[in-house]
Image: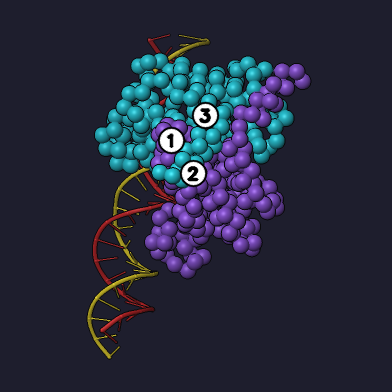
Chain colours: A cyan, B purple, C yellow, D red
Amino acid sequence: MALFRQRGFDGTTVAQIAAAAGVTQVTFFRHFPTKDAVVFDDPYDPVIADVMAAQDRTLPALERVRTGLAAAWGSIPEPAINATRDRIRLIAGHARLAAGIWENNRRTEQLIVTALTGTGVGRVEARVAAGACLGGLTAALLDWASEPDGQDLPERMNAALALLGGQIGGPATAAGDADGSP
Amino acid sequence: MALFRQRGFDGTTVAQIAAAAGVTQVTFFRHFPTKDAVVFDDPYDPVIADVMAAQDRTLPALERVRTGLAAAWGSIPEPAINATRDRIRLIAGHARLAAGIWENNRRTEQLIVTALTGTGVGRVEARVAAGACLGGLTAALLDWASEPDGQDLPERMNAALALLGGQIGGPATAAGDADGSP
DNA sequence: CCAATAATGTTAGTCACTAACATTTCAAGG
DNA sequence: CCTTGAAATGTTAGTGACTAACATTATTGG
C-alpha cells in the first residue's frame, strides 16, 4: 500500500512489491491471486458477511441488510478508519479497480435477492431492489471516502438507506418541479 | 463475438481474434484499447448518451433519466435485440466483465448527479440516488438478459424505475412483515 | 501524378500471471 | 539429536495482454 501511494497502482510492479516484502514474484502470487487483490484484501469483508448472516430473520429483508451493513461498518476500530478511507480512495481513483467493487458486491447482492425472494418478492423486483440498495450504499461509501475526515460511516449508510426506504424520486421530483422556473 | 461464443472469453486470445479479422495483434489494439473493449463496444452506447442529453430539461432529473434510457433502449432495432442480449449475457457470465458495466455507467451517473445537484439536491443525496437508480436499472438489464426471449426491455426499465420512484422499501417491508408469521 | 496522411505491419520489449520442479524451513516423532 | 514429512519459498521457463518505435503500404487531396 505504501508503494501504491508513492508510485500509484499502475506505476508499481509486482516485482517491486515482492522485493519490498523480501520474497519473489511467485511467492507474491501464492498469497494474492492478482495484483488487484492486494487493494481489495479487506480484513473486514468477512466480518460483513458474518454480521449479515447473523441478523434477526424476523426483520424485513432490506431492514436486515441495512442494520447488518451499518453494524459491520461500525465495527471497524477507530485507528483503522483512515487506512480504510485511503484504501477506498485508491480504488475510487482507478477506473478498473473501482469497477472491482462490484465484484465484491455480488455476494451481498445474492444474499439480498435470496432473502427477498424467500419472503415472496418476485425475482425481478428482488434483483432491482438489491441492485438499487447496493448502488445507493456504494455511492454513499465512495462519497464518504472522498471527504478528508468524515467519521460517521455507519450514519451515512443509514442515511443512504433511509433515502431508499423513503422515496428516491420524492425529493428529486420536487426539486425538478422547481427546476421549471428558476 | 463468434469466437467468444465458441471458446469463451478467456479461451480466446487476441492473436486469434486478429487472425480471424485478417490483421495483426497490433492493428487489433489500434481499434480496441483492450480485449474487454470488444465486448463493451456497443453501437448503441453513444445513442444513449445523445438521447439522454436531448431530454427535456424542464422534466425532473430522474424522469429525464427514465424516459431517456427507455427511449434509447427502445430505439434498438428488432434484429439487433438478440445480439444485444447475447452480448450482455456474455458479460454477465464473466465476473470481471460484469464489473466493467460500472465503468460504462460512470458517465450516466455523473449526468444524474449533475442534474440533481443543479436542482438543489445535496451532493450525498444526489450520489446515493444516482447510484440506486443505476443499480436498479443495471439489475433489471441483467435480469432481462438472463431470460431466453424477453422482448420488453424498455418496459422493464420503466418498471424498475417505477419501483425506485415509489418506495423500494415498501413492498419489501410488507413482505418482511408477513415473514414473521409464515 | 505526386505528396501528405492515415492505416497497417514488424520487431522487440514490459508486465501480470501460471506450471513444473527444486530447495529450504520447521515442527513433531523416534 | 536426528530424521522425516509437510508447508513455504525459490528457480526457470513459458503464455498472453499490451506498448513503443520504426518501416511500409494504402488513400486521398492537390
Please give the label number shown on residue A163.
3
Instruction: Please provide percent x and percent y for residue B80.
Output: 61, 61
Q: Residue at x 69, y 51 (%)?
A: B150
Q: Amino acid at mark 2?
A: Ala
Q: Which of C17/B157 is in front?
A: B157
Instruction: Please provide percent x and percent y for residue A7.
Output: 27, 37
- Residue A17 lies in what quarter of the image? top left
Please give the label number shown on residue B61.
2
Please give the label number shown on residue B121.
1
Which chain does the numbered disc 2 sit on? B
The kind of secondary structure element at disc 2 is helix
Q: Which of C3/B176 is in front?
A: B176
Q: Residue at x 44, y 29 (%)?
A: A141
Which chain does the numbered disc 3 sit on? A
Q: CA distance from mark 3 to mark 2?
A: 16 Å
Q: Residue furthest front?
A: A181
Q: Amino acid at mark 1?
A: Val
Q: Which of A102/D22 is in front?
A: A102
Q: Residue at x 43, y 53 (%)?
A: B34
Q: Which of B170/B144 is in front?
A: B170
Say if residue B180 shows up in the picture: yes
- Residue A86 lies in what quarter of the image? top left
Q: Amino acid at mark 3?
A: Leu
Residues beneath discs 3 and 2 located on the same chain = no
